[in-house]
Amino acid sequence: MIDNAVPVGRDKRRRSGIRSALVIGAVGVIGAAFALAVPFTASAAGTLGAAAAADCSAGYVGLTFDDGPNPSNTTTLLNTLRSNGVRATLFNIGRNAQNNASLVRAQRDAGMWIGNHSWTHPHLTQMSSSQMQSELQQTQQAIQQITGTAPRLFRPPYGETNATLKSVEQQLGLTEILWDVDSQDWNGASTAQIVQAAGNLRAGQTILMHDQYATTIAAIPQIVANLKSRNLCAGMISPSTGRAVAPDGGTNPTPPPSTPTPPPGGGCTATVSAGQSWSDRFNLSVTVSGSSSWIVTVTLRSPQRVIATWNGSPTWDASGNVMTMRPNGSGNTFGFTVQHGGNTTWPSVSCRTG
């Protein structure tokens, strides 16, 4: 679905103005619930960091909100995102950003990622290359002056794009981001319908939402709960791939098909859990049960290699692809860092006594 596509797009602002008037009371009610929220500061990273403990084994999705910042809604949106422990990508209209610099700083301080959504939200594909350049560049400059960082992501208004626009984006170092799921909030979708749409998100995908609707803000807690039930987490959008990845920019390591089981007649079990991940590597932790005299075999998946270990004594086979770990007196849990080389499937792990 094209974002507010013609003819819908041409009427969007008139409809939005009417709808904003109708829902402002609802926004006020929701806003009141967060009136005592902690002011936005850099400490938001600590609050949001708690979400890192969630099970993200199914991957990451991108929650995106267009058309901000808006004095009547953005603070409530940020408080709602923070109270639910998630971060989102906010595609700001440049003129709105310039007129509401304190809200842009609040977005930044709340740990959100800020993208470019053009200066005036026009139909860019009907403009000349120089006009496109002005729309995008003004927004880049305004956001950089306010936050200290220029956006790397750009979402074209109405989802309208062409080769000329893509060329302008490239000149400005911007990655074009559309969406995989349209919440239809701009088209009058109810909170239940927005939640239902978000239920279609899969790993790596992005959902289109907007800053200015009370129905969207009310949907956030349910969206987050649904993602959690499916072991999905809200992440950032990678400027290199345009896909949702871990908040630190890493890819999401893929767990093996099943957890190893003890051999017949008893023995030990090795249970693998995820640690931190980065763009080029990830950590895994292995906890052994059933025996304190264990030998764990870790078989890497090409072109992976282990670049660090802790709380165990490793040895390697001749190929360097099989690591054998034994206790070193630090208990029955050890860890290691895998440089994945593009293969993020977890190594296979098995346990035996010896």
Image: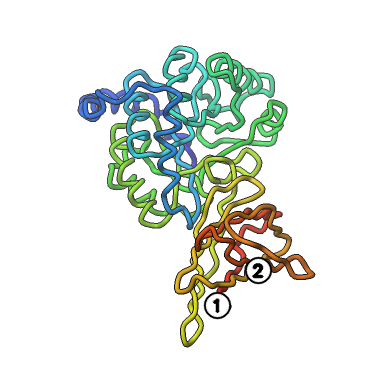
Query: Dot 2, crowdedness within 10 Å: few (<14), some or many (≥20)?
Result: some
- Asked if disc 2 and disc 1 are in contact, CB closer than 8 Å, the reply is no
User: Label 1: which residue?
Assistant: 353
Task: Tell me the quarter of the picture where residue 68 sits.
Answer: top left
Q: Give the alpha-carbon distance from disc 2 to disc 1, as whole Å.
A: 12 Å
- On the picture, is 260 further left or further right than 171? left
Q: Quadrant of the C terminus?
A: bottom right
Q: Amino acid at mark 2?
A: Thr
Q: Position of residue 107 (x, y in %)?
A: 44, 25
In the displayed image of the protein, which residue is found farthest to the right? Answer: 318
Q: Earlier in the sequence, mark 2 or mark 1?
A: 2
Q: What residue would you read off at disc 2? A: 324
**Residue 137 location, quadrant:** top right
Relative to 315, does residue 52 appear above or below in the rendering? Answer: above
State left or right for residue 114 relative to residue 13: right
Residue 28 is situated, as x and y percent measured from the top left of the image, at 23, 24
User: Could you say which quadrant of the image residue 328 lies in?
Assistant: bottom right
User: Image height check: is 9 above or below 342?
Assistant: above
Q: Observer-nearest residue: 173 or 262? A: 262
In front: label 2 or label 1 = 1
Give me the residue at 58% from left, 31% from top. Answer: 154
Residue drawn at (46%, 53%), measured in percent from left and top?
56
Q: How are the colours assigned in the image? A: rainbow
Secondary structure of residue under mark 1 = strand
